[in-house]
Amino acid sequence: MTVTLADVAARAQVSPATVSRVLNGNYPVAAATRERVLRAVDELDYVLNGPASSLAAATSDLVGILVNDIADPFFGIMASAVQSEITGPGGRAGGERMAVVCNTGGSPERELTYLTLLQRQRAAAVVVTGGAIEDATHAAAIGGKLRRLGEAGSRVVLCGRPPADDAPDAVALTFDNRGGGRRLTDHLIGLGHRRIGYIAGPTERTTTRHRLEGHQEALAHAGVPDDPRLTLHGPYDRRSGYDATLELLRRAPELTAVVAANDTVALGACAALRDRGLSIPDDVSVAGFDDLPFSIDAVPALTTVRLPLYEAGARAGRIAMAREEEPPGGIATVHGELMVRGSTGVPRKP
Amino acid sequence: MTVTLADVAARAQVSPATVSRVLNGNYPVAAATRERVLRAVDELDYVLNGPASSLAAATSDLVGILVNDIADPFFGIMASAVQSEITGPGGRAGGERMAVVCNTGGSPERELTYLTLLQRQRAAAVVVTGGAIEDATHAAAIGGKLRRLGEAGSRVVLCGRPPADDAPDAVALTFDNRGGGRRLTDHLIGLGHRRIGYIAGPTERTTTRHRLEGHQEALAHAGVPDDPRLTLHGPYDRRSGYDATLELLRRAPELTAVVAANDTVALGACAALRDRGLSIPDDVSVAGFDDLPFSIDAVPALTTVRLPLYEAGARAGRIAMAREEEPPGGIATVHGELMVRGSTGVPRKP
DNA sequence: TCCCCAATAGAAAGCGCTTGCTACGCATGG
DNA sequence: CCATGCGTAGCAAGCGCTTTCTATTGGGGA
């Protein structure tokens, strides 16, 4: 029914071995023979059987990319970058690799499930994006899985996630969330803000904690008291920003600035302020994090910390494909850049 | 080195066949035996070899999702929806399926390459999103590929793309782009607009053509002359909206409304208008298409046509998994909903 | 009591490919 | 003129799993 290597071999009057070698191009085959084989492939419309090939060769062309949420451009951009780098020469059988983008929803269980699935597929490499869950049990489970993946021959790269203790051979490209958070709040304090609300991400995530720590570091450095009532946690979505802003306004009407966990949350914060009739930045300044594409189109444009998501993803992809050297020690820090725009300004209130 | 089925079998004191049956759960195995096998699996930390399994069973757990651009939420949302539906019970070996999100960049060549790769992997199903290229050669090539995929046992579902002539068995969930475009421009005409600029997407794409046709239909219906100088083509990005708006303003300063090919383009249009000191909607109304999450946060909020991307993707996923019946004739039209918001209003100009 | 069938486990034949090793030429050098 | 060696091609042994067919039970109806 389906055309197999043997059919092609028969048609080209060579052995299956020769056909395989022509297709993989890693063994000398006389030009005339190759020609004949290629013609037969074409005439029969032959398509290699991936599973059979992977089984025999004990490797596959699959590259896994774990993301928390594909629908979120934060992850979409990284995934797109990884993907753009993993395709190309160097692969077996056609040189094309396939990216498997796996949506974990941020759940460690699903993360684990997908890692097992990738291990099952003998993935050539795995890129894990997004912050880690801060739970010893989960961290150990995932770290162990990553280690075993590495041992089984998959290259493991963490992108935007701190190094995993249990997977020492995994390369980590870590975002400097703490430093970015620090600079953002430094900027606000520099403008004169003293009462600053902070809408953090979900608890128990490294990203959330690091950004918040940067914020607190800035407050401490400037001698501004850190009122715990001004820090709220919530998911990384617009709604959370909206609700939290309303709550902050209730708790501290004298607030002059709101720092959001990321740009999406910041957009929600802006909407809440507008609905309350407050002007940005005259009444309240707003700052985000990530600098996603839409942030510049907010009105006023959002002050934020730009994370080079595409560049980081591309680098992760290259490292995963061994086309770029690993950073020394397997760890590199990716810094963000403060983008000062219209949404932050000097506080008008006394 | 790596643990195999045979190792598990040895440890559980059963035959490999039994282990396989326990894992696949499609053959009666006594509870005690199953128990013993499962324990051995656990103790040995066994992970099934996917390629071997796929080879022997002649099917795989992979589901391909083709998108033009993962970084674009339009596709991200659909991909995420498809993914959420393909996972779950009914699958072999653990019941987990893997979504392979493939970034085609809108190029028919890459589309073809990925389809071949999926065929190679014996994908269980393939969901193709996004508009088709209107080129007879490419359409035939892709249609033929889809047909062969179908013949090889993969279920093929088109999501947001018109039916492919060459792949009659592919299910198609088509967006009513023409109707949406029609309603959008009807709305503007109803407000009193007569000079309406249209920033279309790239030429030769069904999506572009259909939306534009809807616009023209509305103009014709209202007896408004269709000035070809007011229609510009460009990619589906912000930049295109920005540049095209400037150009439209140059060509027709008396313009009172701009319809953009999608929300991202509309955001660019808004930015251009703001930079020109024009107010929205008093000087110029702006409308988008898709209703992506950020559209409501534009200032003023964007009038647009909401496409139920998540619902459509989810449905495509279910159909791909044969968990939902195919629409009659294999074709269903998904309608958009006009969302009237602040970015459109009665024209102020005479 | 005996036979037959349902329930369960095993043996073994592949699935389609890769690859180490072997075999065959033919040109070259001693 | 024969030994040497390089350049190609073929043989055949798996890779690890699934699944058909067969074997072995134990139990219930006749």
Image (cartoon, coloured by chain):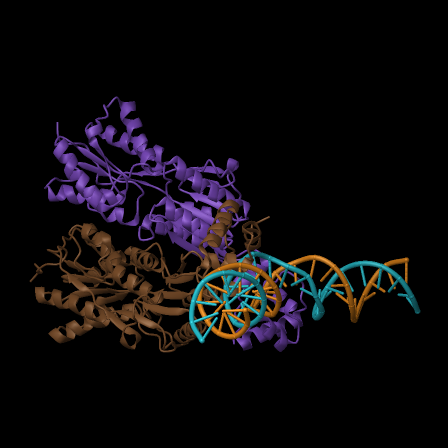
Chain colours: A brown, B purple, C cyan, D orange
Say if residue A104 shows up in the picture: no
Quadrant, the C terminus of chain A: bottom left
Q: Quadrant of residue A258?
A: bottom left
Question: Residue at 23% across / 72% down in the picture?
Answer: A213
Q: Position of residue B338 (x, y in %)?
A: 31, 37
Say if residue A37 shows up in the picture: yes
Q: Position of residue A9 (x, y in %)?
A: 55, 53
Name the one closer to the observer, B93 or B301: B93
Q: Position of residue B37 (x, y in %)?
A: 61, 72
Q: Position of residue A82 (x, y in %)?
A: 33, 60
Q: Is residue A30 above or below residue B20?
A: above
Q: Quadrant of residue A269?
A: bottom left
The total of numbered circles placed on residues is 0
Name the one closer to the observer, A44 or C12: A44
Name the one closer to the observer, A17 or A307: A17
Q: Is residue B36 above or below residue B25?
A: below
